[in-house]
Amino acid sequence: MSQFDNVSVVKQANVYFDGKCVSHTVILADGTRKSVGVILPSTLVFNTGAPEIMELLAGQCRVKLAGETEAQPYAGGQSFNVPGNSSFEIEVTDTLHYVCHFG
C-alpha cells in the first residue's frame, strides 16, 4: 500500500532524540493509529508499550531486539516486529523512512 486514504493526521510532530527521529501520527477511519516518519543516521534505543511492526519504506539500518545478541540488517521494502513492553536498538546508516503499525 503506497498511501492511506480517509485518515486524520495529528498536526503536531513527534520529535525524538534531538530531532534524529520525526514522525506524525495518522489515525485511520476505523480508529487504527500508525506513525509515519524518518530516522536520520544515528544509533538510538526505542522502548515499546504495544507490539509494533516497523515497515521500512526506504533507507538502511541494523536492528537488535531486546534479548538478542546480534543486530540484523534491514532495508526499504522489509519490516520487523517488536514485542510489546520491550525495546530495540536501531543503527540507521541511510536515512530511514518508515511506517510504524501499533498493536
Image (cartoon, grey):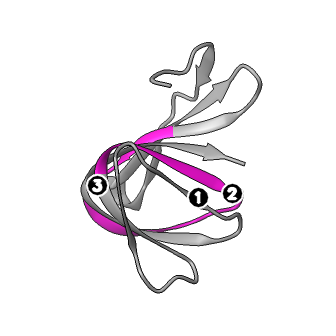
Look at mark 1 in the image and give the residue it sits on: 81
Residue 84 lies, with reference to residue 31, above or below; the image says below
State the residue at coordinates (70%, 63%).
Answer: 84
Residue type of the residue flagged with mark 1:
Asn
Residue 95 lies, with reference to residue 57, above or below; the image says below
In magenta stretch: residue 50 = yes
Q: Secondary structure at mark 2?
A: loop
Residue 20 lies, with reference to residue 42, above or below; the image says above
State the residue at coordinates (54%, 40%).
Answer: 35
Q: Quadrant of residue 47?
A: bottom right
Residue type of the residue flagged with mark 3:
Gln
Look at mark 3 in the image and give the residue it sits on: 60
Say few, some or many: other residues with alpha carbon within 10 Å of mark 1 (under 14 / 14 to 19 / 20 or more).
few
Front-lying residue, 24 or 86: 86
Q: Earlier in the sequence, mark 2 or mark 1?
A: 2
Say few, some or many: other residues with alpha carbon within 10 Å of mark 3 (under 14 / 14 to 19 / 20 or more).
some
Residue 26: horizontal and vertical position, in percent? 58, 30
Residue 23: horizontal and vertical position, in percent? 45, 41
- Extreme residue toward the top, this view: 6
Look at mark 2 in the image and give the residue it sits on: 51
Residue 52: horizontal and vertical position, in percent? 62, 53
Q: Earlier in the sequence, mark 3 or mark 2?
A: 2
Say few, some or many: other residues with alpha carbon within 10 Å of mark 2 (under 14 / 14 to 19 / 20 or more).
some
Front-lying residue, 78 or 13: 78
Residue type of the residue flagged with mark 2:
Pro
Q: Secondary structure at mark 1?
A: strand
Front-lying residue, 1 or 102: 1
Task: State if disc 1 and disc 2 touch (CB < 8 Å).
Answer: yes
